[in-house]
Amino acid sequence: MKRVLINECKAVFPALSRNESLSRSMAAAFALQCDPTVEETAAVKTAVSEAVTNAIVHGYRDSEGFVEMNMKLYDNGLLYIQIKDKGRGIDDIKAAMEPMFTTAPAAEERSGLGFTVMQSFMDKVKVRSSAGRGTTVTLEKRIGGKPLDKR
């Protein structure tokens, strides 16, 4: 059965820490179309927060840039969120997906749990990256609220 796209939204914002809360709020507001539970809303907000924070803190460690967030909603309640940066990229995605892995300097207090947190809250997490070219994190979650139509 083919999915039908109900709605989509794209946002581009500077890779600044203060915009992490903006991205979290945008994702939660977009997900409201599915009539999510409080738990589903919190899961989406947490996963988006982790993905955007990774883009800002690791992707653009010593540089400036932009984060792009694409959100799509399908008729079956599938929420699709893609977070992209054009920063440093990830040399070894498999290692980066391991709990406690971090590229942050020792002086910074980073837990290395970002991808683990995303995986625990979303149905699917996909990471594509190229060193020096950026990273794309795709998050998917089926929201169990009301049926959706194209109106």
Image: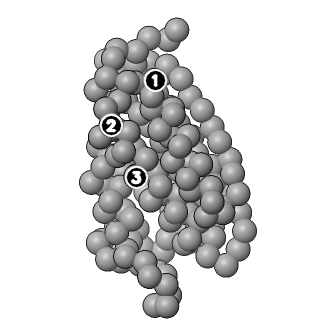
Residue type, mark 2 in image: Val
Q: Residue at 35% x, 55% y: name it.
A: 118
Marks 1,2: beta carbons within 8 A: no
Looking at the image, can residue 3 be seen? no
- Where 61 falls versus 14 (above or below)? below
Nearest the viewer among 55 and 133 is 55
Side (left or right) of 86 relative to 51: right
Q: Which label belongs to residue 112?
A: none
Q: Local crowd at mark 3 within 10 Å, few (<14), some, or many (≥20)?
A: some
* Disc nearer the start of the sequence (2/3): 2
Q: CA distance from mark 2 to mark 3?
A: 12 Å
Looking at the image, can residue 76 be seen? yes
Q: Residue at 67% x, 78% y: name it.
A: 62
Residue type, mark 1 in image: Gln
- Where 99 falls versus 115 (above or below)? below
Q: Residue 50: x percent and y percent? A: 44, 59
Q: Residue 119: x percent and y percent? A: 30, 54
Q: Which residue is mark 2?
A: 38
* Disc nearer the start of the sequence (3/1): 1
- Where 120 falls versus 61 (above or below)? above
- Where 30 falls versus 92 (above or below)? above
Q: Which label belongs to residue 33?
A: 1
* Disc nearer the start of the sequence (1/2): 1
Q: Which residue is mark 3?
A: 46
Residue type, mark 3 in image: Thr
Marks 3,1: beta carbons within 8 A: no
Secondary structure at numbered mark 1: helix
Q: Residue 92: x percent and y percent? A: 42, 73
Marks 2,3: beta carbons within 8 A: no
